[in-house]
Image: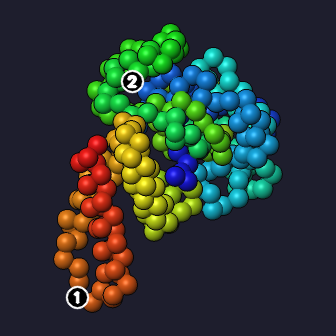
Amino acid sequence: MMDALRKEFKAAGTMQDNSIQAIASTTGNMDRSGDVIAPGAFKSSVLRDFVENGALLLGHDWDDLPCGYIESAKVSGDQLISSAIFHSDPESQRARIIAGERMGAGKSVSVSVGFMPDYDSVAYYDSGAGLLKAAEEMGMDLNQFDVKGIKAYKYGCRMIRSVVELFEWSIVLVSMNPRAKAIAVKDLSGGSAHGLTLENELEISLAGMQRVLDVAGLRQGEGRKLSESRLHIVRQINAISGDVLASHAQPEAKDDDAAKAEMQRREELLQRVNATLNQL
């Protein structure tokens, strides 16, 4: 899946020169969206590429020019600390001034990081307690996790064990992770963070389901099964797809043949996925 996750963090600090330094992300704690980024997820090669190619944005607006460039990025304990230099154009300087004024007044500023996880490393669990049990079974040091906070999470969640690319971090309005903060300033609409239309995303999802179906068929022939984490995703897509199809069970008479054919193709794929799931 070509997706860019957005993780948001609370920020506070002071103004210095023309840059901002922030704790752009943290590891080992549960954020409000039910994600835990595992310790060690941010590799040094990814950080080097981020400094070379990453950007500072406003509100994850990938359609506009960046308001700054990444100066540094490093992991310190459970924190991903990054600094960025503001560009000299009026809009970028306006962002610097507003962030600096808020921090100087002791008010909060939020930052949010956009990244690509290694989806093969993403594992899904029914609760935070289940996630901690799995982490321990994987040989991870639970001292590097917020055990109390994660255990208190009673809903479906996931652990991201590896990040393959960092794209940007943004100045935003809403914070997601209470542990992350900006430490100095020297920084959803309905749109997609990665610039894709809804049609693009649906086609990507459809292609992913087709691949799952192909892989499931191959593994059945070998006497193997899909991993539980991948089956969890398929079940979620299956449930949502069923709801969508049920709400559009009677297409309008004016629908053209091409639209009807596409709907039929997607229904047939869904039926094949259902059949495969029932055999697993």
Task: Point out the image quarter for the C terminus.
Answer: top left
Residue at 33%, 52% in the rendered image: 237
Return the residue nearer the eye: 223 or 68. Answer: 223
SS type, badge 1: loop
**Amino acid type shown at disc 2:** Leu
The vertical placement of 145 against 162, above or below, is above
One can see residue 13 in this view: no
The vertical placement of 141 against 95, above or below, is above
Residue at 35%, 48% in the rendered image: 234
Return the residue nearer the eye: 71 or 106. Answer: 71
Q: Position of residue 13 (x, y in %)?
A: 64, 28
The vertical placement of 100 against 200, above or below, is above
Residue at 32%, 34% in the rendered image: 156
The number of numbered badges drawn on the structure is: 2
In the rendered structure, the answer to whether residue 10 lies left or right of residue 95 reads: left
One can see residue 195 in this view: yes
Name the residue carrying label 2: 131
**Amino acid type shown at disc 1:** Ala
Residue 253: assigned label: 1
Q: CA distance from mark 2 to mark 1?
A: 49 Å
Q: Position of residue 84 (x, y in %)?
A: 74, 39
Residue 29: assigned label: none
Return the residue nearer the eye: 107 or 192. Answer: 192
Q: Position of residue 28 (x, y in %)?
A: 51, 22
The vertical placement of 92 against 166, above or below, is below
Q: Quadrant of residue 202?
A: bottom left
